[in-house]
Each structure stands twice: as C-alpha cells, then as structure tokens.
Amino acid sequence: MDIVQAAYEGNVQLVKQYLTNENEINKRNEYGETALHSVLMGIVDNPEQSEVGLMIVRLLLSTNIDKNAKDNKGQTALFIAAITNQREITAELLKNKVDVDITNDNNESALSFVLALQHTNDQYGYIIDLLRRNGAQWPESSYSVAHTQAQSPEYFHSNHGMFKGSNEKSISEINSHPANNFEEYQQEFQHYLPKFS
C-alpha cells in the first residue's frame, strides 16, 4: 500500500504516516492520480467516507502536495470535486487557492464541464456559483463547450463506473442556445438552474 491507496480507502492514520516521507506526498498511481485525486475517488465510490475524506483533503493541503496536479486525463482534484458535486471539498480546495481555470486534456475547465452536467443533474447550481464566486472564467466558446463528452459514461474514469446514463436532449438543447455569460445562461435555462442570491 502507498499514500494514494491509503487516501482512496480513507485511512487517515496511514496517510499521516506517509506524509512524514517527502517522497510519498506527490506519489502517483497508474492513472496519474495523487493522493488528492484518490481521496476524492474514494468518496465517489464510498460516499460514507465523505467526512473522513474531507479530513484527509485538509491534511494533504497542509503539506507541499501539488494541489494543481493533473492525472493522466489532465484532471485536477478541483475538477473531480466539482464534477462529482463534492461541495465541502470543492470549497476547501478553492480556499487553498487552487487554479480555478486550469483545463483538462480536452481543454475543459471545471466550470465548463459542470455547466454541461447541470443539464443532466440539476444539483450543480451550488458548485457553479462557488466556482464563479472564486473567479472561474466563463468558457471562451460560449456555452457550446457543453460537448458530447458529457454524455459519455466512460469519459471520466471508466474504472470508477461514473456517469451512468445521460440526457442527450438536454445537451443538444444547450448547444443550440449559446449564452455569452452566466447571467444570460441563468435567464435562458431558468427551469434547469436554481436561483442564486
């Protein structure tokens, strides 16, 4: 076992032990994931680990871990936390000044991907608001950034079984109604998006 696996399993004591070794902090698994990525995937696979997972995230962020590290698909911990709707961890990462606009290998930011997901799951309003309040830039190519990848069950991490099913009609509808900014997006898709204060 290493720090990446210990974080995935939510083993706080083992993570603490590994953190005493500088060489372990930024260790990666075969998917290019650091412990910061791995703890988030552990929460996705085992939601009952969310409280322990938040504790591990805070521990990791208190070290010199690369908080903007990308996995083999170019995804950062913020990307994973945001698209899996992990609100407290997304807030914790933003509080620790992660790069809010860093993009993955498909040139998608956390915000652009979450905007696409908002139409298949209307529970992303808080994450969208949180990202915007922390300086996330509106996607350059308007809302057409909501690409077909958001429909792919295999896109994120096929080994973790995420994104089962999709709503193609919503993605098509989004792409046919470009919005220039977040306010215009809210007006255009009020029936999908909750109101923000």
Image: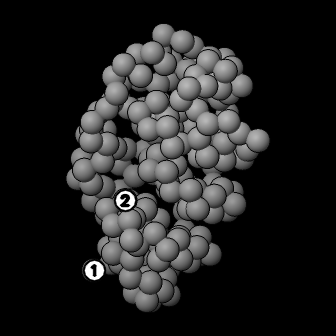
Mark 2 Cα within 10 Å, few/some/many (few <14, many 20+)? many
Q: Which mark is residue 12?
A: none
Q: Is residue 145 above or below residue 46?
A: above
Q: Residue furthest right?
A: 197
Residue in the image at 30% along x and 48% along y: 162
Circle 1: is it few (<14), some (14-19), or many (20+) Cα within 10 Å? few
- Element type at mark 2: helix
Q: How many marks?
A: 2
Find residue 115 and report its horizontal and vertical position in percent: 53, 32
State the image quarter where residue 190 is shown. Answer: top right
Report the front residue among 173 and 28. 173
Q: Is residue 133 left or right of residue 38?
A: right
Q: Mark yes or no: residue 110 visible.
A: no
Q: Which residue is mark 1?
A: 1
**What residue did someone put label 2 on?**
44
Residue type for callout 2: Val
Taking 160 as reference, is 117 above or below it? above
Q: Can residue 130 be seen in this snapshot?
A: yes
Q: Earlier in the sequence, mark 1 or mark 2?
A: 1
**Do tag 1 and tag 2 residues touch (Cβ < 8 Å)?**
no
* Residue pictured at 27% horizontal, 36% vertical: 165
For marks 1 and 2, give the one nearer the viewer: 2
Q: Residue furthest top?
A: 176
Quadrant into which the N terminus falls: bottom left
Q: Where does residue 13 sit, x and y in percent of width and height?
A: 43, 89
As rendered, which of 151 and 79 lies closer to the eye? 151
Identify which residue is drawn at 33% across, 67% down: 46
Percent coordinates x, y for residue 51 in the rendering = 49, 74
Q: Secondary structure at mark 1?
A: loop
Query: In the rendered view, does 88 fall on the left or right side of 1?
Result: right
Amino acid at circle 1: Met
